[in-house]
Image: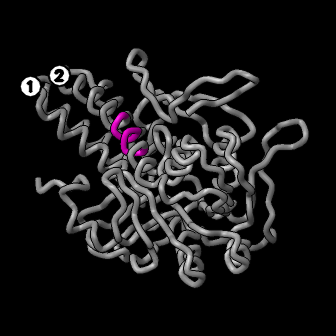
Amino acid sequence: MNVTVNGRTRQYRTVSFSARHNRVVLIEQRLLPHRFKLVETADFRETARAIHDMVVRGAGAIGATAAYGLAQGARAFKGRNLDAFEKHLDRVFETLKKARPTAVDPVNAMLQVRAKIAAGATVEQRQQLACEAAEAFAREDIEHCREIGRHGAPLIRDRMKVLTHCNAGWLAFVDIGTATAPLYAAQAEGKRFHVFCDETRPRCQGGTLTAWELAQQGIAHDVIADNAAGHLMQRGEIQMVIVGSDRTLGRTGEVANKIGTYTKAVLASRHSIPFYVAIPFSTIDWKLKSGADIPIEEREESEVLGAWGVDARGSRHFVRIANPGSSARNPGFDVTPADLITGIITPAGIFQPHELWENRHHLGFSDR
């Protein structure tokens, strides 16, 4: 997408790779919307920390970052012994996998890379194939988002008011995004609509990242407190909800997404408002049989007890907002049951949650 910084506009990808320096290049999302900065990770461990610490976040973006991190780790290996190389790659894989356990995209992305590098007969060939496979995943992520936009745009009507939760925009993917893809496609068609961005406590990715994206794109929007959504629905001010997903179960249609998504789905159902989930193929988990089995990441309690912001001089600070002696629980995700979901927007079209499994061979499932 195009980003305007200091009056200059140019195109950026959320994540890319510098083969020359063997570094993963990321937009430092923790600084947005107040500062736009690119950072580079020096090795796969630093890449894993960037995923864990949310320098980069969002299903597709951390998937591409993990794919590039695997290639980065592969290229750092010194020697010609294939067995030693594969053991090294196992360690790289596990390090990156553990960075964010709820999202399935990193695992799917790295498995895709490993499947393709197996064709290499030497360490050098596998290192080269790793780079090519990681880049292929990133390009595929963009294409999937573009197709999601094409299929989802007809859902957006003129003068519609749409609610989003968290950030499933281009910052959460390599480009374009999933929940935002229909919005961007509808805007390109000349439709005029309004977006309500849930602030999405505790990290406020809706108020910071989604709102920043929409402002950059010139889409009308308001940031709302998470607890205001029900009020607006009750008064008829929201006609559709569209969110992303960090893991969608192909067997059941259950969706794990940022904490608070389940709440919005319940509210939407209560008010007969369509609730859509937008996902690329890499977000589908074809193995798990129940949403209860999805690992839910518990993050640091400081995220709930305080907040980051900037002062009048533009300096970034953390301030505690909760009672000094109190502790906190901070589950990062929740699971939305299939019966609360109107449709799942994929690169292959829009499906009912229960239709995913019967259409699995059109949705990226492999019997291998």
Residue 268, above or below 176: below
**What is the quadrant of residue 322 in the picture?**
bottom right
- Residue 69 screen position, x and y as percent: 38, 35
For image coordinates 54% across by 57% down, the residue present is 156
Q: As rendered, which of 277 and 348 lies closer to the eye?
A: 348
Using the rendered view, name the quadrant where residue 238 is placed: bottom right
Is 11 or 324 nearer to us in this picture?
Answer: 11
Image x and y of residue 342, in percent: 44, 72
Q: Which residues are magenta?
A: 139-145
Q: x, y (%) of residue 324? A: 80, 68
| Residue 121, numbered circle | 1
Residue at image point 30% right, 33% down: 136
Q: Is residue 160 above or below residue 217?
A: below
- The colour scheme applied to this rendered structure is one colour
The answer to whether marks 1 and 2 mark residues whose Cβ atoms lie closer than 8 Å is yes
Q: What kind of element bears circle 2?
A: helix
**What secondary structure is the magenta-colored segment mainly?**
helix
In-image side of 231 versus 13 (left or right): right
Going by the image, does 251 lie left or right of 253?
A: left
Task: Tell me if residue 132 can be seen.
Answer: yes
Q: Name the residue that disc number 2 marks.
A: 125
User: Mark 2: which amino acid?
Assistant: Gln
How crowded is the residue under tag 2: few (<14 C-alpha within 10 Å), some, or many (20+)? few
Q: Residue at x 27, y 70 (%)?
A: 355
Q: Is residue 141 magenta?
A: yes
Element type at marker 1? loop
